[in-house]
Image: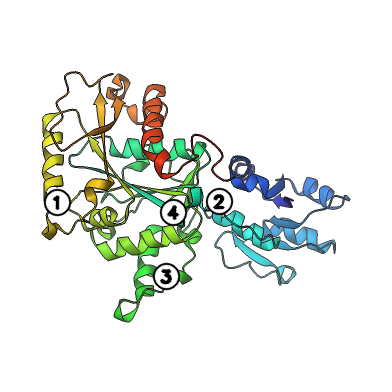
Amino acid sequence: MAARIVLAVRESQYIEPLLHYIHHSEYGELLRVSAFSRPETFMEFMKSEETVDAVVGDPFFIEAWLVEGKNTVPWAVLSEDGRTLGKSANLAGGMVIAKYQSLPALLESILQLCDVVRSRSSSAGREQTFILGVVSATGSSGKTTLALNMSKQLTDLGLSVFYLNLESVDSSGLFVPVPAGNTPGLERLLYDLKACRGEGGKNNAGSIELGRYVARYDRLRCDAFRPVENFKEMLQMTRQDTLDLLDLLAAAGSYDLVIIDAGSIEEERTLAVLQRCGILLWMLRNDEASMYKTLRWLEHGSHSHSGWPPDIQEKSRFVLNFAADSMEGTSVPEGIKLDGLLPYIPSWALRHHVELCLSSPQFMAGVQQLCEGIIEPALPLVFTGNLHE
């Protein structure tokens, strides 16, 4: 039976995306939420005879309710810094939940408050989160546009997705608004991961709570890190740093899929992606230079001294962007077998085209077809049934 939760926060804009996510995810079967943004309405409901399993809210709401003396159900305060509740003695003894964190992490904390034991189904029988890397041998291939569209569409299908941008300069902010809030972000997480590695290289990252560093991107309806402001932090990110980060995301148990928008192929971060991903999606431009450079990189990766994983060919899938309706007139060199086509969108040549990149029906249809061909074999039942049955 679903737990009955009362949520009370001042901002009505906080409520809508949370309820939308619950309704369209596996949490819809576990939680029933009554949400309030007005104190008087909240207090009136709490004085009724309605049975609830837990109350979660801003300190102002919780304190006003506790003064009434009706605190026989578990309760938690939403704290903006995730740690402190101010100086109010009335709030002592309650659970503290970070208000601004990833929605899966927030809802897991609420389930814990209700003492609901949930066995998270491993997606399609898998033991770990699936990792997909998107790379390109040339610039301006549409790599970020594809990664963002895939994140959005797969989330709409019910998957829990994390979008990870590992470019030296994160360009995703051009396409989607950066969420408000004060979560520490990727810079702090990388620092904490290094600290957890400790002497001798031993990794103690299990103590890190991933949700503290994650932001919710409402337009994508998935989680991500805010763009790193000082891109020197990205330039100094090592292969081991990246592997530790990917291991943390995979072990968190909150995501079905991590989609990585990788940087340049020669960077250490990308080498870690090649090693750790289950599928490597190569974005090609419809021109001779893109085909040539991609083929040369694949030849390099086939040598034992390259440092690339030996199964790179098996992992690789190839997608041609800016393509015509068919492959007629397109020359594909031997060694590259196209797994998908994405159409050329004339309106994207306009000056302010970035706002159109997540809303083109023709491109979205191409991405869906690509996902059906590439993601479906890795995550069965995404397109053909209920993933979480």
Question: Which numbered disc covers residue 129?
Answer: 4
User: Please, is residue 342 above or below residue 12 in the view?
Assistant: above
For label 4, the SS is loop
Work out whether residue 294 or residue 372 is closer to the camera in this orientation and state it. 372
Of tags 3 and 1, the one toward the viewer is 1
Of tags 1 and 4, the one toward the viewer is 1
C-alpha span from label 1 to label 2 = 41 Å
The image's colouring method is rainbow
Mark 4 and mark 2 lie on one chain; the one further toward the N terminus is 2
Of tags 1 and 2, the one toward the viewer is 1
User: Please, is residue 204 above or below residue 375 in the view?
Assistant: below
C-alpha span from label 1 to label 4 = 27 Å
Q: Image quadrant of residue 134?
A: top left
Q: Answer few, some or many: residues within 10 Å of disc 2's Cα (few below 14, many 20 plus, some between 14 and 19).
A: many
Q: Answer few, some or many: residues within 10 Å of disc 1's Cα (few below 14, many 20 plus, some between 14 and 19).
A: some
Instruction: Tell whether label 2 touches label 4 (CB within 8 Å).
Output: no
Question: Which numbered disc covers residue 302?
Answer: 1
Residue type (three-letter) at the residue carrying disc 2: Leu
**Left or right: 260 with respect to 136?**
right
Mark 1 and mark 4 lie on one chain; the one further toward the N terminus is 4
Residue type (three-letter) at the residue carrying disc 1: Ser
Of tags 4 and 3, the one toward the viewer is 4
In the picture of the structure, the residue carrying the numbered disc 2 is 103
Picture residue at 40% right of the left edge, 44% below the top: 378
Q: Position of residue 59 (x, y in %)?
A: 68, 60
Question: Which numbered disc covers residue 205?
Answer: 3
Instruction: Tell whether label 4 touches label 1 (CB within 8 Å).
Output: no
C-alpha span from label 4 to label 2 = 17 Å
